[in-house]
Amino acid sequence: MHLILSAPENRPFLEQELLRALPTSVLEPLGDSMLALKAPGSWSEIRTAVGLTVFARQWLPEARSFPVPSIRAAAETLVTELIGCLPEGAPWRLQVEPRFGVADAGRHRCELIRDSVIEQLRKRRRSLLKGLDAVPKAALGDPNRACPLFQPEESLVQLLLTSLEVGFLSILPAPGPFTSMGCVSPFPLGEVPVAVDKAAPSRAFAKLAESERRMGRAIVAGETCVDLGAAPGSWTYQPVQRGARVIAVDRSPLRDDLMRSPRVTFHQGDAFRFVPEAPVDWLLCDVIAAPERSIGLVLEWVRERRCRYFVVTIKFKGQEDYAQLDVLKREMPRWVESFQLLHLCANKNEACVFGTVGDGPLKNAG
Ligand SMILES: C[S@@+](CC[C@H](N)C(=O)[O-])C[C@H]1O[C@@H](n2cnc3c(N)ncnc32)[C@H](O)[C@@H]1O
């Protein structure tokens, strides 16, 4: 059995998405924001068949029920399991998290279980303790924006408390977390706190900040971005603050200070007709348009290799069009090194596609 977490409002869409990918699987809802998936085959077969999932925040592959009679007893059982299956000295991560109505008491209990696991490892198997959180998380510009992407040698242990006495345990040995990127999230519960910057022109700021964190890559000084549908300017503001240059395209002007910035070149016009004179580092696009237009735009930019990295919002009017996102899963060109397609924590009725086209030679756009 595999467990999949979503935002509560997205669970029905997650169900539909999974059934399109795995029509013969059995899905059982567990609470309002979790599904149990039963399907034949190994985790790697399931992962390959499912591909990316827009509405899944986190996966717990090969999860099983895990009793928590007491903190100490749960930690002892877990440590015995870990000694049996994790390679000594290799890096691993431990995420002990609460779910459902156990939030406050559960969070505290999770912390105590984690502490108890560490204490027992200290006594029983120090070599395993050395590997816990042993891969340093590269800072993405400031300490609050660490890059948590999995490395090939890392294993992931997730213990999810669904009540104070019971939970689910999932142990995904290396290189599973690395090869499941885009499915299994390095963020506990798959959640990224929504960023706040009161000086930004709007809250749209949080979507770009979250995409960068999930990519493990930030826009840096000296890079060039094209920002399509840029007004009032939060997605332009962020790279400008970091010393990048932005070609901002919109029908309306951006906030005054951004219009005056020497790092911003403003093009008044149609985002869908804009082609840069030369390839750029980043395509940023938060334009309000029908989903098929934004999907077509990102595919065109990537096929034409007009950018190295992309972050594009796909906006919806209702809830009928979500299956259109499958076009991106199917048609993203092979040379795209990595990409994710997600309903972000900062998204409303929209999804975000972001990724890396690759460092190969860029094609001339002209
Ligand atoms: C959600 S807002 C973008 C917010 C922006 N990312 C920010 O952080 O401030 C969408 C923008 O898309 C622009 N827009 C919509 N259709 C457009 C088009 N065809 N060409 C250019 N801009 C367009 C609108 O004028 C609007 O400013």
Image: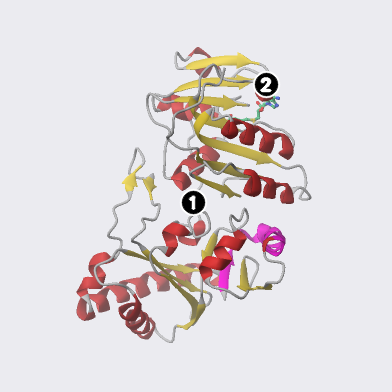
Q: Amino acid at mark 2?
A: Arg
Residue corresponding to mark 2: 273
Count the numbered circles shown.
Answer: 2
Under circle 1, the secondary element is loop
Position of residue 284 measured from the top left corner of the image (x, y, whole percent): 55, 31
Q: In 3D space, how far apart are the residues under numbered discs 1 and 2 (Cα atoms)?
A: 34 Å
Task: Using residue 306 as the reference point, say whether residue 12 is left or right of it.
Answer: right
* Circle 2 residues within 10 Å: few <14, some 14–19, many ≥20: few
**Residue 183 visible (yes or no):** yes
**Which residue range is magenta in the image?**
2-20
Any atom of ligand 1 within 8 Å of the CB at mark 2?
no
Position of residue 96 measured from the top left corner of the image (x, y, whole percent): 42, 69
Task: Using residue 259 as the reference point, say whether residue 37 is left or right of it.
Answer: right
Q: Amino acid at mark 1?
A: Val
Position of residue 63 measured from the top left corner of the image (x, y, whole percent): 51, 75
**Looking at the rendering, in which quadrant would you find the N terminus?**
bottom right
Q: Answer above or below: position of 193 versus 297.
A: below
Position of residue 215 measured from the top left corner of the image (x, y, whole percent): 46, 45
Which one is earlier in the sequence, the residue at label 1 or at label 2? 1
Residue at x 31%, y 75% (from the top left corner): 117
**Looking at the rendering, in which quadrant would you find the C terminus?**
top right
Q: Quadrant of ligand 1?
A: top right
Q: Answer above or below: position of 2 versus 198.
A: below
Residue at x 36%, y 81% (from the top left corner): 81
Which color scheme did the rendering employ for the protein?
secondary structure
Any mark on residue 192, and which? 1
Any mark on residue 208, and which? none
